[in-house]
Image (cartoon, coloured by chain):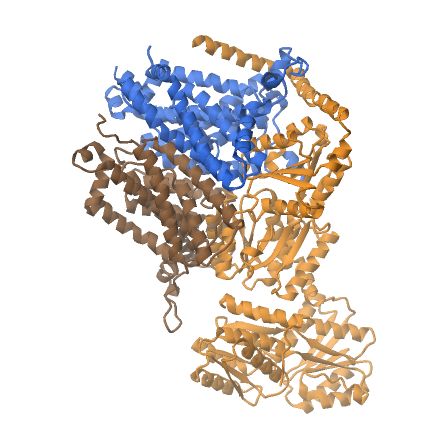
Amino acid sequence: MNEGLSVLAIIVGIAHSGIRLATPYLYAAIGETFSQRSGVLNLGVEGIMLMGAYSGFFVVFKTGNLFLGVLAAALTGILMGLAMAFISVTLQAEQGISGIGLFMFGLGASSLLFKTTLGTVEGVKGFPELHLCLPSGYCLSDFPVLGEIFLGHSLMVYGAFALVPVSWWILNKTTWGLKIRAVGQNPQAADTLGVSVAAVRYITISIGGMLAGIAGASLSISLLNIFQENMTNGQGFIAVALVYFGSWTPFGVLAGAMLFSLINALQLWVQVLGLNIPSDVAVMLPYLLTIIVLAFPFRRALQPAALTKPFERGEN
Amino acid sequence: MQNPWLKRLQAGRIIDTLLPLVAVAGALIVGAVILFLLDKNPVEAYKAMFTGAFANKNGLADTLVKATPLLLVGLGIAIAFRGGVINIGAEGQLVVGALMTTFIGLSLGEKLPGWLVIIIALAGGALMGGIWGGIPGYLKARLNVNEILSTVMMNQIAVQVGFYLLRGPMIDPAEVAAGTNIPHSARLPKSVDLPRFVDIARALGFTERAKDLGLTGFNAELYGLFAEPTRLHTGLLIAIVMAVLVYILLWRTTIGYRIRAVGISPAASRYAGINVQRYMVLSMGLSGAFAGLAGAVEILGLHHRMFEPLSVSAGYGFSGIVAALFGKLHPLGVIPSSILFGGLLVGGDKMQRAVQIPQVLVTAVLGLVVLFVVGSEIWSRRRANRRVSTGPDELSGAAGEASS
Amino acid sequence: MKKITWLLLVLLALALVAAQCGGPAATEAPAQATEAPAQPQEAPTEAAPAPAPAEESGPFRVAIVMPSPTTDMAWGESIYDSLLRLQEETGGEANFEIAYSEGMFNVTDAAAAIRDYADSGYDLVIAHGTQYGTSLFEIAPDYPDTSFAWGTATDTGADQGLNNVFAYEARAEQGGFVNGVLAAHLTQSGVLGVVGPVEAGDAKLYIDGFVAGAKYANADITVNVSYTGSFGDTALAAEAANTHIQAGADILTGSAQQVVGAIGVAKEKGVLWMGTQADQSPLAPDIVAATQFYDWVPALRDMMEKHQSGTMGGVVYSLTLDNGGLQMLYSDNLDQNAVAAAKDTEAAIAAGSIDPFTAEAGAGAAMADEAAATLNYDFDPVRVAIIMPSSITDMAWSQSLYDSLKQIQDVVGADKLEIAYSEGMFNVTDAAAAIRDYAENGYNLVIAHGAQYGTSLFEIAPDYPDTSFAWGTTTDTGAEQGVTNVFAYEPRAEQGGYVSGVLAANLTKSGIIGVVGPVNAGDAKLHIDGFLAGVKAANPEAQVNVSFTGSFGDTALAAEAANTHIQAGADVLTGSAQQVVGAIGVAKDKGIPWMGIQSDQSPLAPDIVVATVLYDWRATLINMIKMNQSGEKGGKVLQLTLANGGQTMIYADSLPAEAVAAAKAAEAGIISGDIMVEIQ
């Protein structure tokens, strides 16, 4: 089948798809990295993504303004993040269960809003793909291999990848990052040194929420340009898993997101090329291979010591 | 043996029980506002919710039927959490358990006596779930693969395995013959059905209907729940027995003590000579086994055949976690919490049907309920802190034992 | 504590014993369970007023339980919309009440909902998911006065003694097959992509049908099928669509609610989409080419009527093309030949002459082409001769006719169609000799394939009254001169020219288009006139530079003309006659898009031949042969038009979607008669 396609063309196709698929995971997982680095496991990413996807879509649908859409998604995400922060930090609730509650709320609320405001699946004109065409009509995205893989994506895609070094820098090279890590590692010590554990966590969870909201918007106004109920379909949970995969570092998350997405793109090609593999087996490939890759001996993951542990001043 | 959890339960029973109810009420008030905005009558809606879950025999039966897998999954979650591992993979473990049970039921059902096949099938389902949970446990213990990641992945794999089996090797031959190819297995032989409550009642001689006995009102419904045809099956009893057994395991045996010790401090446990890795695998394996058992019970008691497992993200895997955490990760606490949560789910559906609101509103309100309840616990914890000196978390109770 | 444990264990043991001591007991108990409620439930209905008036006075109450949302643009929406339409038909909520529970992927919850609706007195409770069957069969016996419906299924539980369950299914493979045939006709790349959820149920039926249909119409076609493994993974469905497009697919289809993601991608990339279940065109009106629409109304209405007349179940409903449960919706801007082929396939499936599951690959290739131009090769052995001015490999005028004749021969065999040809007959005297010679040698049909041959032909024809002659391009059959055995034929070249013009106007960036013509006459003139009209219609600002080389065969001059156009700023070129190969060569060197006419010129320069008006002579030829055999030797004027399939537009994959859409709209306009191409 498809003898016409060269191996190179397929590799290019996989890489191109992989980059696109990785985008929502990157936003969501890097946001979650901030939150977990400060010691809060937010399992509600999926719900926040859905709310972000909806609000971003709705604003673009009504105004046609893409940046307002991203803004709306970010604000919605921050609001959801603040709710999570209030429950898990101020009320010191069990984080896993709060996250599941937030997920259920986000799933229900986004679908309810969709039903009451839109009613049917609509499309919008989302972020265009950037082909960087020269006046001569030649597009850089047609430049063999490199151009074909890395160009021709939308701004939201590049934003996700730009986020990786930026968040690495924030986490590792700024005082802010130091505070975040300290709060996640030893909140008592951080507190003694005058760092407000609650404030840091409120901010990181809000950042996580904001990025999760944008992750949803990257689906609804950039990659798919539609909104549908439960459109994230478990991506938020994969994103949380990818934070663990990435050992709580942005570049680790990048590696995980790319690995998972590339294998997912590969399985799509495996099916398209008509290789004689049952579709179910192809679909489970990314999950299987991700586990197998992880089974290779890695350095011990540096889980933030205070992860999932609520902090109360004076404790211990 | 004084259990701090029980002690606390007795001490602050009333307020501790009231608090979650207040929280639920708070969430429902928010839901009422939404209902009002949608032009629906909140009173009517919530009345339907309550009566749908608890006020008649079918509602009660549905609640208990729903609570059964929640309880079993919740027990597994509780073991895992106690053992210091997080099991997000109950959904997948449930699926493989159900598949295994179906396979056993179909291949042995006609050859052996029904009761024997039921036991083998339950054990097989649990074993398969245990293996499915044990793999992430092993990966964590030996290769340091994070179990949240691997269980999330294993869920997807289980579902795809299920799809594959039900379309190929396990599909009902009648479907193939008829050309309809509906992806479900053949029905298991009737001899391996877990008996329904009504079957037992009839076997014990309660053949009259509530009406014949002159029962009215809730009494009639309660009688009907046990002695008239509902879907309530003996899987509920299995689940309750298991809850007791898990309690005994965790608090009355060395193995359980070690599981909890590893959960509280792996380092300290290693000092104490406990094989930490082995107990991690054991916790995950047991956790998976209970999810697998939940799948087995669902097949034998309710569905009697395996069909396409449709969704991973919002099924019993997560509801079970919520039930377990509502039950404070205590095996006996999970019993009422899974019944309550099951009732909420069933009642929510009933509310949807009664006032015709979108199903998703129910989901959103349930999400609020979870958030409100979990958020409200700080007050009961604070009171507990004042009352008991051992710490804010019930895990500390276990810690006390571990260090003793 | 221990005591409680033991008590429970004993209870459990009891339970197991009860299950076991009941080989017979257990089977008896359920039997009781099913019969027992029947009596008490009947009693009150008899005591109360009879059931019939109750049904007439109150509204008919329907409840539906489904796994996906009512707005899924697929399975759930298809039946919910049908219910709404039936409600409207029966006079609104007062007469027809609808309750629904959506998102019921959890079967246990669904079963509770089904029971509850039945318990609340709904007349018809629909379990809209295969997975609900087992539960439904348990519940149905308890509510003998309620009708249940289960789909997709063909099992009404009759062998289990149930009589109040309807079963329904959609024969999705039928519309899938039609969509496949249509896609095979529409595809330029020969690659189709399918985005499925899970390889089972309704989706599998549809996809199997689609693959069979595509292969049936064209055995060589590539259909890539990928499954996402879930019903709701919109993002993965979108990426699957992307992958298909990268693998060369130019038409996509798929099933389940996740496909809205794939449709979004198709919309963005301008790739056609074939829908199923619900009408997905609101989402992307431009690219949803065809939809297999599920109309559940007749089945639902019948269930309602059966219920009201006392039949509670036991009937299996199949939505088929034949009974109108499946309806094909076609977009307006499709190639009419392809639609015709699809509609013929529809009819054949409805009539039972095609079975989607047993249809042989490639078997429809001939048939479908026939459909395009009502081709029917049913004629007696015939001998055909052609006299033409250029060579049969001129990539233009002569080759187009010869190729068509060859294609007919490929179908009927050389023993049924003998072909003789004289090429390069630019000398009319030589041509006349050839014409007479062929007639003398008993050829049944002698074709003078050049306007210049007319005078000679009218001299020769009367001498051979049993021979049919054909002359083109012309509309003159010589009837005025008393000639009765000459057919005239004429491609309405302005039609294809117009479409090319619209396309060119959409493609040009410089606003300058170059045309390389031979002489300003005949077919070339028609084409160029149409082309000018098309450009003007699409972009009045665009400038068209026309140059005639004054000959049909001066390749070098044509090349130079092309060069000149390019220097003059033209960025789209077209031209006709055999000389244009020179111009095409230049266009190729400079990377300038070229629009061909007559024969398919893309083998020459696949990258730059962006569109071709292909002349398809087969219908015309067969028509003439048949008339000849039925005794009608001439006197008819035959035209090749877009509408009758004599001209077909071929578009390259590389074209921008908007430009192709504009061109296709022009095609459709010409076919429907909305656009009249004015020629000077």
Q: Quick one: C267 or C120, which is closer to the camera? A: C120
Which tint is chain B? blue
Examine the rendered structure and indicate whether residue C328 appears above or below residue B323. Answer: below
What residue occupies the far left of the structure in this picture? A193
Q: Does the image show residue B312?
A: no
Q: Which chain is orange?
A: C
The residue positioned 51% from the left and 76% from the top of the image is C505
The residue positioned 66% from the left and 59% from the top of the image is C342
Q: Does the image show residue B271?
A: yes
The residue positioned 54% from the left and 24% from the top of the image is B54
Which tint is chain A? brown
Picture coordinates of residue C610, whole percent (x, y): 51, 72
Examine the rendered structure and indicate whether residue C361 appears above or below residue B231. Answer: below
Q: Quadrant of the N terminus of chain C?
A: top left
Asked if residue B279 lies left or right of residue C496, the reply is left
Examine the rendered structure and indicate whether residue C146 appears above or below residue C168. Answer: above
Picture coordinates of residue C589, whole percent (x, y): 44, 77
Asked if residue C196 lies left or right of residue C213, the reply is left
Picture coordinates of residue C609, whole percent (x, y): 51, 73
Q: Quick one: B88 or B306, which is closer to the camera? A: B88
Asked if residue C48 lies left or right of residue C27, the reply is right
Q: Quick one: A22 or C430, which is closer to the camera? A: A22
Picture coordinates of residue A105, whole percent (x, y): 43, 38
The residue positioned 50% from the left and 36% from the top of the image is B362
Q: Quadrant of the C terminus of chain C?
A: bottom right
